[in-house]
Image (cartoon, rainbow, N blue to C red):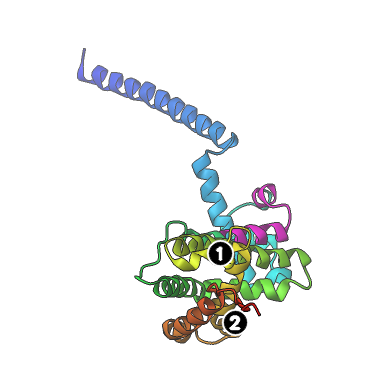
Amino acid sequence: MGEGALGNGDEELGAVVGVAADRKAKKGADKRATMRVGRPSRAMAGEVDSRVLAAARQVFLERGLAGATIDEIARVARAGKATIYARFPTKEALLGEVATQTAARVRAGFETYAPAGVTIDERLANMASEILRRLLVPEVLDFMRLCVAEARRFPDVAGVGRLIRERATEAVARALSEVTRSDQIGRSPAFAADRLGETAQFFMDIVVERLLMRGLFGEDPALLRAEVDARVERSVAFFLAACRPTRSATTTHSPR
């Protein structure tokens, strides 16, 4: 064969290979398109959920529940409206899920938390300080303000705030049970199983709520966190004084 024949053969072979490659690429594209049409993987669905909830939090905090729209949330999340509606039929449902996640993040830090300290006073003070440092951050305070502001116009939102309080109280009740088990104060009726939830709520009211309310009304969280240790120490002492068991007064009458 001459050199020209070899050249023409190479061109023909190249053309055949090119067509085959084109067909293979098209087949791969068709396969990928088919895969995209099917149900997304669990990992992909989880990633979409995370983007939607992060976008919803951002838009809710900027616009409020009434001013937020699914269109804007979809744009921020880079997701379709149909994708959001398939997961959350209403804005209230979406807000509820954001609140649940917020409460879960606050609670998660206490699942394995063991307060340090030698005495019961020290251990409870350390626990209260940790709770306040987790609550007195702009992200949590802003979201709690949103729930308070929208509760009257959207009654379902009132349940969101209740959910956050219940999650925090459950974590405190668990910690109180552990902390008081090794101390004589654990014999107090206040720490009985059927009263522990109520005692945990009193703990929150006495030790936590005052600084938290100041944060909700706009005081600088950083300055409030600087006050935590001193205020908690006094509040815990008051709480324990109220919980300690008292001896029953007995009166002995001598016979006449």
In the image, residue 201 sits, relative to residue 22, either above or below, namely below
Marks 2 and 1 sit apart, C-alpha to C-alpha, by 26 Å
Position of the C terminus, as image quadrant, is bottom right
The residue at the point 42 percent across, 82 percent down is 229
Q: Is residue 216 shown left or right of residue 7?
A: right
- The quadrant where residue 188 appears: bottom right
Comes first in the chain, label 2 or label 1: 1
Q: Name which residue lies at 43% across and 85% down.
A: 230
**Residue nearest the observer in this picture, 228 or 234:** 234
Instruction: Indicate whether residue 95 is drawn in magenta.
Output: yes
Horizontal and vertical percent position of residue 84: 65, 52
Q: Is residue 138 visible?
A: yes
Count neighbours of disc 1 (C-alpha within 10 A) and say few if under 14, some if 14 to 19, many if 20 or more.
Answer: many
Q: Please tell me whether the stretch drawn in magenta is mainly helix, strand or loop.
A: helix
| Residue nearest the viewer, comparing 172 with 68 | 172
User: What residue does disc 1 label?
Assistant: 191
**Which quadrant of the rendered structure holds the N terminus?**
top left
The question of residue 213 being in magenta is answered with no
Q: Nearer the viewer, mark 2 or mark 1?
A: 1
**Residue on which disc 2 sits:** 213
- Rendering coords of residue 139 (x, y %): 53, 72
Q: Which residue type carries mark 1?
A: Phe
**Quadrant in the rendering for residue 124:** bottom left
Magenta stretch, residue numbers:
83-102
Q: SS class of the residue under badge 1? A: helix
Q: Nearer the viewer, residue 86 or 237?
A: 237
Looking at the rendered structure, the kind of residue marked 2 is Met
Q: Residues within 10 Å of mark 2 (few under 14, many from 20)?
A: few
